[in-house]
Image (cartoon, rainbow, N blue to C red):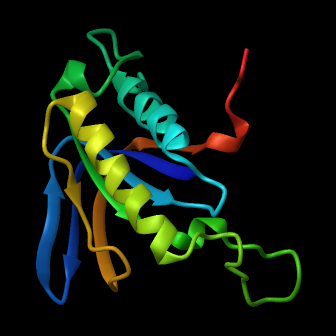
Amino acid sequence: MRAVLQRVSEAACRVDGNITGEIAKGFLVLLGVEDADTEADAQWLAQKITGMRVFGDENGLMNKALADVGGDILLISQFTLFAQTKKGNRPSFIRAARPDKAIPLYEYMISELSKLTGKKIATGIFGADMKISLVNDGPVTIIMDTKEKDTH
């Protein structure tokens, strides 16, 4: 499972002109699901996302987590995070999980994030043509991959 985490002052997702998810301060999370991913990967990633201390404290240092600033999450499914680009100019998405595997894990991630934050998670629509708008605050953008987690 791969996530691109962006600290935002606002973000929204539109499908066919209608807002499906919208937040003020918090994280826009683009989530890619790989065939080998499991619920354990989602649990680990959800804990990392909600615990990530990238919000400014009273001294302007990145010491506060999402809950400390009352932030929200906009979670967007994005299979293109697993694009393979080594050969040619057309990306291959063979590593991305098919919808029958990816949708349940995406929904599980929504429930895990909601459980950890105690809040409703704003979302896009899986597989839809989404238009994402955001104001990246900082900018702060962090890439996380469950295959690179430290097991020590």
Along the viewing direction, whichever of 119 and 65 lies nearer the viewer: 119
In the rendered image, the vertical position of residue 92 relative to residue 51, given as above or below = below
Q: Residue at x 71, y 22 (%)?
A: 151
Q: Residue at x 28, y 68 (%)?
A: 133
How far across and down, in percent of the image, does residue 52 sit? 43, 26
Q: Residue at x 86, y 88 (%)?
A: 88
How far across and down, in percent of the image, does residue 63 sit? 39, 14
- Residue 96 shows in this picture: yes
Quarter of the figure with residue 139: top left
In the rendered image, the vertical position of residue 47 relative to residue 101, given as above or below = above
In the rendered image, the vertical position of residue 142 relative to residue 106, given as above or below = above
Q: Is residue 85 left or right of residue 97?
A: right
- Residue 136 shows in this picture: no
Along the viewing direction, whichever of 82 and 98 lies nearer the viewer: 98
Along the viewing direction, whichever of 11 and 84 lies nearer the viewer: 84
Along the viewing direction, whichever of 26 and 84 lies nearer the viewer: 84
Quarter of the figure with residue 138: top left
Figure label count? 0
Q: Is residue 136 left or right of residue 84?
A: left
Q: Is residue 77 left or right of residue 133?
A: right
How far across and down, in percent of the image, does residue 99 sit? 47, 76
